[in-house]
Amino acid sequence: MITIHLRNKISQRIAQGHPWIFANEVERVEGNPVGGELAEVFAHDKKFIGRAYINPKSQILARLLTRDKNETIDALFFERKIKEAWDYRQKIGYTENCRLVFGEADFLPALIIDKFNDYLVIQTLALGMEVWKDSIVNALEKIFQPKGIYERNDVPVRELEGLTQKKGFLSAPFDTNIIINENGLRFHVDIEHGQKTGFFLDQQDNRKAIQHIVKGADVLGAFCYTGSFEIHAAHYGAKSVLGLDISEAAIESSRKNALLNGLQDICRFDAVNAFDVLKQFSKENKQYDVVMLDPPAFTKSRESIDNAIKGYKEINLRGIKLLKKGGFLVTSSCTNLVKPEVFLNTIESAAKDAKRKIRQVVFQSQSADHPIIRSMENTNYLKFLIVQVL
Ligand code: SAH
């Protein structure tokens, strides 16, 4: 058995429940670990901490799977954990589509599973999880008897683990263009080619939050991807909706989704750079009742947080300038590196620059099927804000 012995003082992070163990927190490793192997972790005073998978190639040397001395890590462990994750989702009201497993927050570090009705999409983002992929697929077959399982491991973060990027079927092949229901609407999901796992489930509850403010409104939505917010706006009674995204494929899917819901007369979609177009609209004195912004993360590392904040400020300033007095800004940020307080301050500062007053209508996080555990800061990543702009 491989054993990992931590340095003098166990870090607060690990003590409070975070499963990651960095190489510089470890005094010594006994045995000759092969990447992906299981190891027992001990504190400096020899106290048992838990069982983890290890990867000597990764900066995150090990990730804890259990802190229970009596719990064995085997195929049944994964089946039990996935069942627990599914029970939890059902208990809080998710039946058809949900993030079934949200990595650390489900105590399965580096495992993501999205459920789109009868289809499951998996990401195994660390070597120690990758080696259990067959057991995970078997467990999913047993629990769900799904119509299909697909792997979207075409993610750069895998390379930090010495893994290659790949995607493909983990079940018998199936048509990867599927349709899901969300909030009484229907959406095409392209499991094979869509961004990430194909559809952003993390905003599914937030999309409902625009219900009242879009009635009779002229709505502008930037960074629309599949048009999900924009089609919700049309469905909830907007007069007109314009959605923008830089990706032609995204705009194509937005148009298909508008058609699927019979909302093609209200929704228009354009493939453009939102930064440029928002600036141009402002020059032309265009005015909207609701502006919705859901940009990409702008940063993936701590070093570029300042640039990300600049990006958020810039795009929100442009959005605010396009709002009629009393209109609403619906704005998101999807990186945990920009903390909620910092995001709120950024929007406040954009409003000041635009010489407008704002008042908060809604401020929340990602949907509850992506649970937040306070001691694992990377689980608290999405900010969703609606403000009235006066
Ligand atoms: N609102 C979407 C998710 C948006 S993801 C939803 O709820 O599903 C961010 C989107 O921003 C991506 O589709 C990406 O193509 C787009 N994007 C990135 N840079 C852009 C830019 N400069 N202008 C317009 N769209 C951009």
Image (spheres, helix red, strand yellow):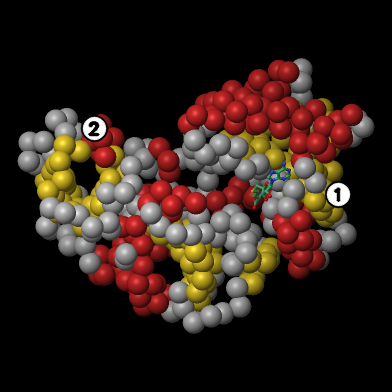
Nearer to us in this view, 233 or 306: 306
Residue that numbered label 1 is attached to: 239
Left or right: residue 270 versus residue 51 is right
In front: 236, or 206? Answer: 206
Q: Residue at x 80, y 36 (%)?
A: 276
Residue 328 versus residue 267 in the image, above or below: above
> In the image, 194: left or right of 125?
right
Pointer 2: residues within 10 angstroms few (<14), some, or many (20+)?
few
Residue at left offset 42%, top offset 75% = 144
- Residue 293: give x, y in percent of width and height: 70, 40
> Between residues 239 and 226, which one lies in front from this camera angle?
226
Q: Which mark is residue 199?
A: none
In the image, is 309 to the left or to the right of 354?
Answer: left
Which disc is residue 11 wearing?
Answer: 2
Horizontal and vertical percent position of residue 260: 76, 68
Q: Give the SS element for disc 1.
A: loop
Quadrant location, the N terminus: bottom left
In the depicted structure, whether residue 357 falls above or below residue 94: above
Residue in the foreground of this view, choosing between 364 and 292: 292
Disc 2 element? loop
Q: In the image, what residue type sits under mark 1?
A: Lys
Q: Earlier in the sequence, mark 2 or mark 1?
A: 2
